[in-house]
Image (tube, grey):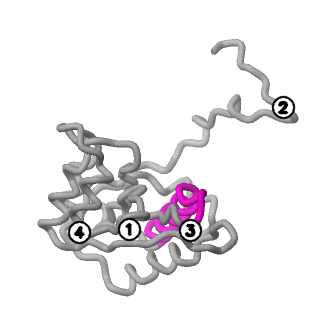
């Protein structure tokens, strides 16, 4: 990567991974990026659970009804938790840490994909949070926000096409309703 602009164009969600394991030094760099993420009043309300066990990855892949099945074939996942007892902005702080880790993974040439947990349910109506909490022994007060699937990409996607940017979503001075909506 030559610069940040290239990095954010190249970072695309990866849902297919090679069987290669992530190297310990790569994982350390990804975790460092999360640990260095900014947080409100530097309260660092997040916690990260690293999961490499294939059985647990399989169980996590069905924690919600849609959008997580590919996790069963990922070599590694990081579950991002937020502590609501430390701050009321745990969602924002944990989200920032998660995207910092995704950007670090991309810079290392690895793929990642955000799997939403908060506010989702499985096919039986059980909350994804409850499923993850039970699998990983997460104490009360901590909430799973998302799971990051990580691994060596098994497919390369084209960088984000800047011609598709929706500049109509940018408002200068005040919000102006688009007439086409």
Indicate the quadrant where residue 135 lies.
bottom left
User: Looking at the image, is mark 4 or mark 3 nearer the viewer?
Assistant: 3
Residue on which the image places disc 1: 110
Q: CA distance from mark 2 to mark 3?
A: 34 Å
Is 67 located above or below residue 111 in the figure? above
- Disc 3/disc 1 C-alpha distance (Å): 32 Å
Disc 1: CA contacts within 10 A as few (<14), some (14-19) or many (>=20): many
Label drawn at residue 86: 3
Q: CA distance from mark 4 to mark 1?
A: 11 Å
x, y percentage for residue 41?
Answer: 69, 71
> Disc 2 marks which residue?
174
Secondary structure at badge 3 equals loop
Q: Earlier in the sequence, mark 4 or mark 3?
A: 4
Q: Is residue 151 visible?
A: no
* Picture quadrant of residue 72: bottom left
As helix, strand or loop, the secondary structure at mark 1 comes to: loop
Along the viewing direction, whichever of 143 and 6 lies nearer the viewer: 143
Residues in magenta, as a range: 86-107
């Amino acid at each position: 990567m030559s610069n940040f602009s290239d990095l954010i164009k190249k970072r695309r969600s990866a849902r297919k991974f090679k069987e290669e394991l992530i190297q310990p030094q790569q994982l350390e760099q990804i975790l460092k990026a999360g640990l260095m993420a900014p947080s409100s009043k530097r309260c660092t309300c997040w916690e990260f659970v690293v999961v490499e066990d294939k059985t647990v990855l399989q169980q996590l892949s069905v924690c919600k009804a849609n959008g997580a099945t590919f996790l069963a074939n990922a070599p590694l996942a990081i579950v991002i938790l937020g502590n609501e007892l430390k701050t009321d902005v745990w969602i924002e702080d944990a989200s920032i840490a998660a995207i910092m880790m995704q950007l670090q993974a991309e810079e290392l040439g690895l793929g990642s994909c955000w799997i939403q947990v908060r506010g989702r349910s499985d096919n039986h109506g059980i909350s994804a949070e409850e499923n993850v909490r039970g699998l990983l022994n997460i104490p009360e007060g901590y909430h799973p926000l998302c799971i990051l699937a990580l691994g060596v990409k098994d497919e390369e996607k084209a960088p984000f096409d800047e011609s598709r940017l929706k500049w109509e979503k940018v408002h200068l001075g005040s919000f102006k309703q688009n007439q086409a909506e």
